[in-house]
Image (cartoon, rainbow, N blue to C red):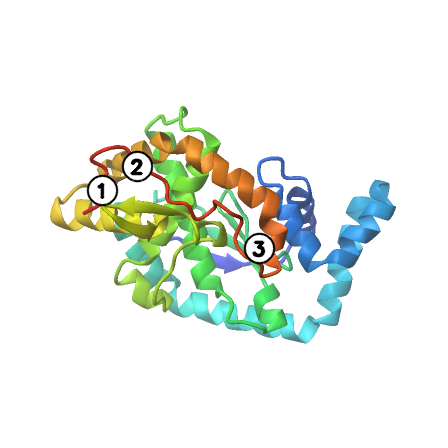
Amino acid sequence: MKIPSIIIKEDLDQEVRQFLRGLHHEQFPWLKNLISFTFPELVQSIKKSPDREEQLVRSFIIGYRKKHEEKIKQIIKESKLLLDSKSEEALISLANVMDYAWPENHPGYIIIPVILPHSPYGENIIYFSLLGSVFGNKKPHDVLFISIHEISHMILHTILKEDHAEQFASLNFHYLKEILAAVLMNQKPLKDTLGIKEYFGNDNLHEIYTLDGDEKVRISVFFQRLYEKLKYEKKKSFKEILSEMSQIIVSIKDELKEKKELWNKYSRKTLNGTIVPEGYDKPIKLPENQNAI
C-alpha cells in the first residue's frame, strides 16, 4: 500500500487567505468570534479600515511571526522531526480503521503552519495552528495529531464522493466528519501512536450528548461504541459502518442544527470560560433501536 508523504511548507499568501476565510465564513460565524477573541487588535483595526482588510491581515501576520520568530522556528523544526519519525506509522493505522488505500498517484499532504487559532484544511493541505505552542499556556495538539484528524476528513470526503453521496448536506457532513475523527483516533494502535488518552473531538462536540439506553453520553462516545460494536463484533466494513452512522446523523439533523445555532451565538462566551449555553447539553433523543450497545 502506498503511504503518502506529509511535508511542511510555509506559505504567507495561503495563510492570509485562511484568515480572510475565517473572518467571513457564512456557515461557521463562530470562527470570526474565535479570531476576534484571540486577536482583538487585528479585528479592531479592520473595523476602522475595512477597505484595507487584506493588507492589515498580511501586516499583522508578518509582525506576529517576527515577534515570535525563534519560537516558531523551533516548533516547525520539532514538527518536522515528529512527522519523519511517526507519520508513516500513524497513516497505516488510520488506513486500517477506515479500510482505505491511497492511489499510487496520490500527491501527498502539505502542512502549512499558520498563526490562526484553528486548523482548517483544503484539498491535501492542512493549516497547522502554531498558537498553542507559541502561547505555551496549555499542551497543544501537535502536528501529527492535527494531520491525522484532518486527513481522516479528506479520506471520508473521498469515500463519500466515490459512493455518489451528493445528497449528504454540508451540515450533516460537518458533524459526521468531526464525530468520526474522534471515533477513529480513539482506536488502537492509532490512539497509542498519537499519545491519546481520551479524545472527544472538537470543542463544539464536548457538551453535545445523547442517550445510550438510559445513560447520558457524549455524542462522540456514543458513536465510538457503535463503531466498535459494528467493526469488532459484527465484522462490518467501514463503508457499512459509515452508512449506519450517516443515517443516524441525518435522522437528528434538526437537533444538530439547533446545537450549531447555539454554538454560533454563544461561542464567544464559551471561549471566555463561562457556562455552556442553556440547553446545549440537553441529550438528543435518537430514533428507536439506535442504541449503540
Residues at circles 1 and 2 in contact by the CB criterion of under 8 Å: yes
Q: Which residue has dot 3 on it?
A: 270
CA gap, disc 1 to disc 2? 8 Å
> What residue appears at the point 50 percent right and 68 percent down from the top-left corner?
80
Q: Amino acid at mark 2?
A: Leu
Residue 272 locus on image (x, y percent): 62, 60
Pointer 3 and pointer 2: residues touching (CB < 8 Å)?
A: no
Residue 16: image location, x then y, percent? 70, 49
Residue at the disc numbered 2: 286
Q: Tell me which numbered mark, 1 or 2, is placed earlier along the sequence.
A: 2
Q: Residue at x 29, y 38 (%)?
A: 245
**Residue found at x 83% / y 42%:** 50
Determine which residue is flagged by label 1: 291
Q: CA distance from mark 3 to mark 2?
A: 26 Å
**Label 2, residues with CA under 10 Å away: few <14, some 14-19, many ≥20:** some
Would you place residue 159 above or below residue 183 in this image? Answer: above
